[in-house]
């Protein structure tokens, strides 16, 4: 539910100025979709390594206590009549968006489990560590026409870490967010409350507080082309009735969208919104997106299931549609670009990759504040494990 705001934007760093800027590498990466229309690249189906939860105070717990269970209304009963405005703003506790968490929660999980990773420290030294939401933005970049992004990258003990930076435009937009948009964000979370129970077989309780601090996050391992990936993303719920109980195959993503009444509205939905839904769910291997369509009064009147692997069929014959191969090929190209650009192993050194629609991805180099994002507690704890400094690995793994 990323369009609702900062639900999965936990990795953003806020920046005000280019202090401590170093000489810039003189190369860039084009984003034109035509350059990435080749065959679909190798992508290994992600496997879940573990999970963690964030509670109502945004405190980390290395378990699944925040996991919720998919509990839709009966298919043979009357249609849903969910009032998404109910409880707003009295029963709404939004997360404090000024708090910039970076990769901190994922790094804490990694610190606790680094000794149990298959392949050990050697595998981690060749991997890319980031949030799923950051990879989602890379996938959709060739087709994005409105919002730019910035990704900070640092190499430490061979591992490449990527953490999103909040652009000045995004910050200004967030601070000037109109009341209607704030309410729409609430409505997306409220829909989850109507569709999820706290235990398998239980019933949803929409009478409680909507607290967006609470989150259940899956930690996954995958591979795109030659790039090993370790990434984490928030999961809305698990389906106790799923054919496979093995995560992430049992996970369900929940979305809301306005009701559509014309072929043109559906065509626009498939071209734009469904692209983001596909990218967000394909990366972690979430097989199903369930959407609630709301009327102008804010009531969900219908539900529709979108299998992730079938989403492309809606635009396959649309000359202005999107192509999964383009998305994945660009993401792979960006990861190769980042791996070959960030060669110095130094957690205080940051390469800032910046992109605005219509242009290429550019790079600037910075040291320490405000862009450095790997916390000292993580650097020190990881360093204590090593008898000597590691060598930077070859770009090929």
Image (cartoon, rainbow, N blue to C red):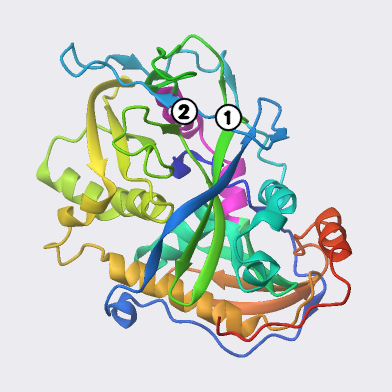
Q: Does residue 61 appear to the left or right of 80 in the view shown?
A: right
Is 156 magenta? The answer is no
What residue does disc 1 label?
212
Percent x, y for residue 178? 51, 35
Q: Does residue 264 appear to the left or right of 247 in the view shown?
A: left
The answer to whether residue 166 is above or below residue 223 is: above
- Foreground of the two, 41 or 249: 249
Furthest toward the top, the residue is: 207
Percent x, y for residue 352? 65, 72
What is the chief secondary structure element of the magenta stretch? Answer: helix
Is 184 magenta? The answer is yes
User: Which image quarter holds the C terminus?
Assistant: bottom right
What residue does disc 2 label?
189
Q: Where, by quadrant of the figure, is residue 345 drawn?
A: bottom right
Secondary structure type for disc 1:
loop
| Residue drawn where x is 16% and y is 53% of the image | 314
The answer to whether residue 226 is above or below residue 63 is: below
Q: Is residue 267 visible?
A: yes
């Amino acid at each position: 539910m990323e369009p609702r705001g900062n639900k999965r934007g936990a990795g953003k760093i806020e920046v005000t100025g280019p202090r401590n800027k170093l000489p810039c590498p003189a190369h860039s990466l084009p984003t034109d979709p035509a350059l990435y229309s080749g065959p679909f690249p190798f992508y290994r189906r992600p496997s879940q390594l573990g999970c963690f939860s964030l509670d109502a105070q945004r405190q980390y717990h290395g378990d699944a206590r925040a996991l919720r269970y998919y509990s839709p209304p009966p298919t043979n009963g009357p249609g849903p009549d969910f009032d998404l405005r109910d409880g707003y703003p009295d029963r709404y506790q939004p997360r404090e968006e000024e708090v910039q968490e970076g990769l901190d929660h994922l790094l804490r999980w990694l610190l606790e489990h680094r000794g149990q990773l298959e392949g050990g420290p050697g595998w981690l030294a060749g991997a890319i560590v980031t949030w799923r939401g950051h990879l989602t933005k890379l996938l959709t970049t060739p087709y994005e026409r409105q919002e730019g992004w910035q990704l900070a990258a640092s190499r430490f003990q061979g591992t490449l870490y990527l953490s999103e930076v909040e652009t000045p435009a995004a910050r200004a937009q967030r601070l000037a967010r109109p009341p209607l948009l704030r309410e729409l964000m609430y409505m997306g979370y409220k829909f989850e409350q109507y569709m999820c129970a706290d235990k398998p077989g239980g019933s949803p309780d929409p009478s409680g507080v909507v607290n967006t601090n609470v989150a259940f996050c899956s930690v996954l391992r995958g591979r795109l082309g030659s790039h090993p990936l370790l990434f984490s993303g928030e999961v809305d719920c698990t389906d106790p009735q799923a054919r496979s109980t093995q995560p992430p195959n049992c996970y369900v993503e929940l979305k809301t969208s306005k009701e559509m009444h014309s072929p043109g509205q559906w065509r626009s939905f498939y071209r734009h919104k469904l692209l983001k839904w596909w990218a967000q769910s394909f990366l972690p291997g979430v097989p199903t997106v369930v959407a609630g369509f709301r009327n102008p009064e804010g009531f969900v009147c219908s539900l529709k299931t979108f299998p992730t692997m079938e989403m492309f069929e809606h635009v396959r014959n649309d000359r202005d549609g999107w192509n999964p191969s383009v998305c994945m090929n660009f993401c792979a190209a960006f990861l190769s670009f980042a791996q070959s650009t960030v060669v110095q192993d130094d957690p205080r050194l940051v390469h800032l990759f910046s992109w605005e629609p219509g242009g290429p991805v550019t790079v600037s180099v910075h040291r320490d504040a405000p862009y450095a994002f790997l916390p000292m507690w993580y650097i020190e704890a990881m360093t204590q494990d090593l008898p000597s400094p590691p060598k930077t690995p070859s770009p090929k793994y």
